[in-house]
Amino acid sequence: MDARKPSPSAGERLKELRVRLGLTTRDVEEKSQQIAEDKHSREYYLSHAWVTDIENGKFTPSIYKFYTLSAIYQRRITELLSYFGLQIGDLSRYRTSVGVPKTHLLDSGADLDIDRVSIPVRFKPDFRLDKTNLLARIVEKWDEIPVGFLQHLDLRKSVYGYIGLEDYTLFPLIRPGSLVQIDASQRKISSEKWTTEFDRPIYFVELRNGYVCSWCQVDRGQLIVIPHPHSHQDVRRFDYPSQAEIVGRVTGVAMQIVGEKVPGVAESPRGSAR
């Protein structure tokens, strides 16, 4: 749909709001006149004819008229904008994906009340922090909080994994306690060339007795789980796919890089990833 053209359904939704509040188009005109006078600008004014035309899909309101309708209909302006296909919550996603040349602070307060994102608030009783696992299998209860920065995530529909506190397989690249985002559509080991460890594909793998997040390669019917050189973990081999199955490729990671105490790799158990 052309974003410049008004949406008939948007006008219908505005009319529904007006009728539900017991307002006539004349009432809206009168109230908009009060706002325009207070703002000392006719941009905020809506004649009853304009209200009718907007509801019939002939015009898209200006930003000033959206302001007026938001006040009169007692709805967030972001909700009214969404009727016309303008999803303000998407701004957070575009801010992070578009990028700018200079390093800068993000506006942490922007758009926080616009959309809600689902997050785990209660884990299953048998959940063990020391073991790597799929997030969907360890969450008992989900709830929603207004976090605009995470608006584009839907943890209940996507695949996410938790890196166990004993899993040092890719330390320090991916630390224990991290959450990883997994693209389940990429379940074959990529043959693409890589130049640094940051370019090397990482996979989330299901084993018979748990999970592991690592670099992988297939050799003569075996899946080779390759740890980070600094992790001091052993390379492991599993019959593939009978003993190991690739859940998907890791495409994102959320982790803390500074904590109260960063455990030494020497203290970590060898080959303990699950």
Image (tube, helix red, strand yellow):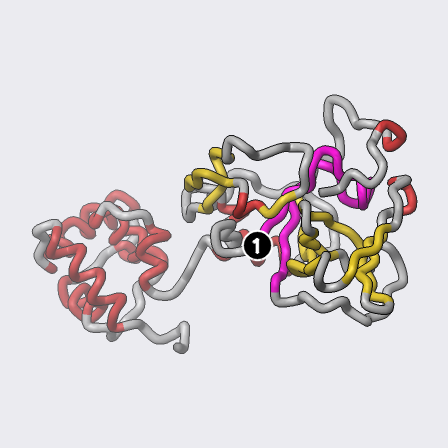
Front one among 209 and 25: 209
Above or below, comparing residue 52 to residue 144 in the picture: below
Q: Determine crowd level at label 1: few under 14, some 14-19, many 20+ residues with C-alpha closer than 10 A.
A: some
Q: Is residue 163 magenta?
A: yes
The quadrant in which the N terminus is found is: bottom left
* Magenta segment: 159-184
Percent x, y of residue 240? 75, 63
Rendered image quadrant of residue 50: bottom left
- Which residue, as the protein is rendered here, is positioned at the far top? 260
Above or below, comparing residue 38 to residue 18 in the picture: above
Q: Identify the residue at image location x=31%, y=72%.
A: 6
Q: Identify the residue at image location x=83%, y=58%.
A: 224
Residue 232 lies left or right of residue 112; in this view the side is right
Residue 81 lies left or right of residue 258; in this view the side is left
Residue tagged 1: 159
Local secondary structure at mark 1: strand
Magenta stretch, main secondary structure, is loop
Is residue 157 something that shows in the picture?
yes
Q: Identify the residue at image location x=72%, y=57%.
A: 243
Q: Is residue 31 magenta?
A: no
Disc count in the image? 1
Residue type (three-letter) at the residue carrying disc 1: Val
Rendered image quadrant of residue 172: top right
